[in-house]
């Protein structure tokens, strides 16, 4: 009796596995390319706005187009999706661009963690199984002091620098001429004394 129960279980398990494999008729191979941030940190200052571009890719043998939904999981107080839609159609073997804006409040002095979720959106029909997947991208936003721009020299300062450079060149030429005269006089004196 136990052998028949085990055979039934194995047969049912194999049948279920076969049905699942047959029902999966789409291959999605989506990936996300995020902007480069050293140590997954974005350094900004209060009042700063930074636009980030995430590239959604559907390659690696993808046979079907894929819809990818983007959502801000953490950090919605500073991060927002700037595109008109939050679902992107990415063609098989192609790519799409998602734009995220980071806006730091003027009074911010904190560190924020931003986490963005990229999920496949599947259309379900009554006769198929559909499995979705999600990739999360997270990074820290460090709020620091606004950098003080180095002062640009005024036109008068540039002119003064140019004049002083020209004076240096004139002094160098005068020095070379004096040196040549001394060498020339020394050679003449040596020639006269040897004759």
Image (cartoon, helix red, strand yellow):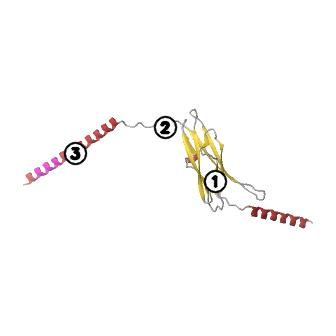
Q: CA distance from mark 1 to mark 3?
A: 70 Å
Which residue is at 51% across, 36% downward? Answer: 146
Q: Is residue 84 above or below residue 16?
A: above
Q: Nearer the viewer, residue 179 or 81?
A: 81
- Crowding at label 3, few (<14), some or many (≥20) Cα neighbours within 10 Å? few
Asked if residue 149 is positioned above or below residue 20 in the image, the reply reads: above
As helix, strand or loop, the secondary structure at mark 2 comes to: loop
Q: Is 28 displayed left or right of 44 in the figure?
A: right
In the rendered image, the quadrant that contains the N terminus is bottom right
Tag 2: Cα neighbours inside 10 Å, few (<14), some, or many (≥20)? few
Rendered location of residue 188, percent (x, y): 11, 51
Residue where numbered disc 3 is placed: 173
User: Which residue is label 2 attached to?
Assistant: 147
Instruction: Please tell me the numbered disc located at residue 89.
Output: 1
Tell me whether the residue at label 1 lies in contact with that at label 3, contact meaning CB atoms closer than 8 angstroms: no
Position in image of residue 126 (x %, y %): 78, 56
Left or right? Give the position of 105 relative to 129: left
State which quarter of the image contains the C terminus: bottom left
Which of the 4 image quadrants contains residue 29?
Answer: bottom right
Which mark lies nearer to you, 2 or 1? 1
In terms of depth relative to the viewer, which is nearer, 89 or 143? 89
Image x and y of residue 131, in percent: 73, 56
First in sequence, mark 2 or 3: give its number: 2
Question: From this viewpoint, is residue 191 visible?
Answer: yes
Q: CA distance from mark 2 to mark 1?
A: 39 Å
Range shown magenta: 180-190
| Secondary element at tag 1 | strand
């Amino acid at each position: 009796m136990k052998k028949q129960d085990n055979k039934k279980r194995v047969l049912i398990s194999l049948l279920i596995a076969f049905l699942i494999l047959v029902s999966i008729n789409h291959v999605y191979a989506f990936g996300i390319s995020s902007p480069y941030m050293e140590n997954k940190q974005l350094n900004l200052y209060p009042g700063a706005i930074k636009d980030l571009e995430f590239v959604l890719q559907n390659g690696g043998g993808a046979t079907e187009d894929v819809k990818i939904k983007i959502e801000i999981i953490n950090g919605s107080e500073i991060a927002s999706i700037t595109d008109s839609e939050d679902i992107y159609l990415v063609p098989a073997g192609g790519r799409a661009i998602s734009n995220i804006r980071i806006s730091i409040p003027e009074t911010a002095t904190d560190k924020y963690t931003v986490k963005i979720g990229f999920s496949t959106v599947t259309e379900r029909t009554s006769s198929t199984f559909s499995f979705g997947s999600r990739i999360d991208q997270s990074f820290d936003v460090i709020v620091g002091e606004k950098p003080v721009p180095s002062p640009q020299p005024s036109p008068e300062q540039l002119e003064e620098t140019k004049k002083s450079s020209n004076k240096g060149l004139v002094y160098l030429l005068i020095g070379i001429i004096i040196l040549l005269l001394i060498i020339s006089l020394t050679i003449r004196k040596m020639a006269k004394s040897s004759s």
